[in-house]
Amino acid sequence: MKNKFVKWLSLPYAFWSIAFIIIPLIMVFYFGLTDKTGKFTFANILSISLPVHFKSLLIALLLSFISTVICLLLSYPLAMILSSLNSKNNKLMILIFVLPMWMNFLLRTLAWQTLLENEGVINTILRTIHLPALKIINTPYAIIFGMIYNFLPFMVLPIYNVLCKIDKNLLNAARDLGANEIQTFLKVTLPLSVPGIISGITMVFVPALTTFVISDLLGGSKILLIGNVIEQEFTLNSNWHLGSGLSIVLMLFIIISMIITAIFDKDGEGSAL
Amino acid sequence: MANVLKRIYIALIFIFLYAPMLVLIVLSFNKSKSRAKWGGFTFQWYTKLLSDSSIMEALVTTLMLAVLSALISTFIGTIAAIAITSLKKGARTLMMGITNIPMLNAEIVTGISLMLLFIFFNVKFGFTTILLAHITFNIPYVILSVMPRIKQLNPSAYEAAMDLGASPFKAFFKVVFPDILPGVFSGLLMAFTMSIDDFIITHFTKGAGVDTLSTKIYSQVRKGIDPKMYALSSLIFVTVLVLLILINILPGSGKKAKEK
């Protein structure tokens, strides 16, 4: 298939990606680096140092960090259990995680309001078994909860994929050479699963850091994340310049996590697909 | 003992993932409009659903977007995947790097970047702008699911077909295409799913007057969700579930799974 004609076939997609991926990103920088009169300025980017903006960035970083850590701690054992099951169920397992996507993402997140509310399902259950009620709706905890719920599959799938690819002979060899289960895990399984872990971390951290929907739905619109600030600049205040400036700051964090992924996951082994 | 613990763990995660689904299905039968109160059992939201023209319109928009964006992105993406594999290493890395941008970038940034593009070039916001945005974020999923299939191809098969007198076109459709078809199909399905479930990018690229189910639900968050939405989502979910079960138990599908 290595003939000249086939190479030319990449042109339509090349044009598409320039028009709808590259130029739009240049637009973000153009708007972010100019003011309303079109004059060059750093003011939009530097406005991140305003207390309101800076606080929203810090909260977003903190909440997304906590959610990512919890997702990792929940997913790793799960991925290990799933990968140790019969591999014929492979597709089914992935299906179980993709299936919830067929119920609208906003409704799924809103359903947690019903579950978490002070008079909600979970608290009713807790009360009937005489346990103290949880007061987490409209608090940062509810946002963390929503993040974990929405992004958990993105952590499970890449880790599951790398774990499935590990050659079972390696594990047997380690055991034959006298390693116990913990040593086998620490010296063989864990290092080999690093690409999946890193890929999972970026796939959870980036959407969690940048979300505005989850904080909107579960935080009672009292807690503003950096995503909420940007969204409001675009839709409520129509201040595209300020919104773009803040997005450039946000992209910095995204680029850092992309670079980390690229270093650890050169062959795309950890991809979820 | 360890096995029991493992099962309990899987079950807990499973409950965690599916509890909201159950809540939504229960709410779709709730007579009370409130999300927090159970007002008795009713079918009315299902029966009233069809006559609600604004929800039906949003459903049609959502489905049209999903079908069109999935088909177009599968077409562009499949061709792109074939072409990219034939490129030299440098060009290939560059193209794959660009392909990864929409996948790794935050949806809000993709959304506002496209919004700015349309603002800058004075494009009228509406169905077309959403469609362009959906195709854009769908293409990478198609490329990434077709690519591994192309890498597995045996290049001699295509050449052999040509040696035996097939035109390049015929050789492609008789030899190459059947081999990459599963990848194309899963890319198509993925694109369709992504488009249906998208809210963020649609939110930034839609104009006034055009609504998908997601954006309609979002606009109802403050004033309270119309219970018909729960009914509709439950219907969609159950339909997909039944389809998937049918596909998995239909005779012949098991054979395909083994071949893989």
Image (cartoon, coloured by chain):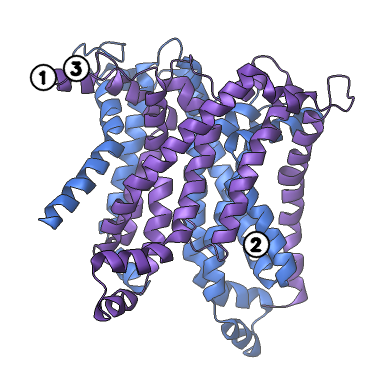
Chain colours: A purple, B blue
Residue under numbered circle 1 = A130
Q: Residue at x 16, y 22 (%)?
A: A126
Do the dots labelled 3 and 1 sit on one chain? no
Amino acid marked by disc 3? Phe
- Left or right: A242 as drawn, with respect to A115: right
Amino acid marked by disc 1? His
Cα gap from disc 2 to disc 1, whole angstroms: 61 Å
Residue B55, placed above or below residue B91: above
- Left or right: A92 as drawn, with respect to A133: right
- Which of the marked residues, 3 or 2, is nearer the chain's N terminus? 3
- Left or right: B208 as drawn, with respect to B38: right
Residue under numbered circle 3 = B41
Q: Residue at x 24, y 67 (%)?
A: A181
- Which of the two discs, 3 and 1, sits closer to the camera? 1
Q: Is residue B132 visible?
A: no
Amino acid marked by disc 2? Ile
Residue under numbered circle 2 = B79
| Residue nearest the viewer, comparing A28 with B246 | A28
Q: Residue at x 62, y 63 (%)?
A: B81
Q: Secondary structure at mark 2?
A: helix
Tell me which chain the residue with mark 3 is part of: B
Tell me which chain the residue with mark 1 is part of: A
Q: Secondary structure at mark 1?
A: loop
Cα gap from disc 3 to disc 1, whole angstroms: 29 Å
Quadrant of the frame with the N terminus of chain A: bottom right
The location of residue B239, given as percent across then percent down, is: 33, 40
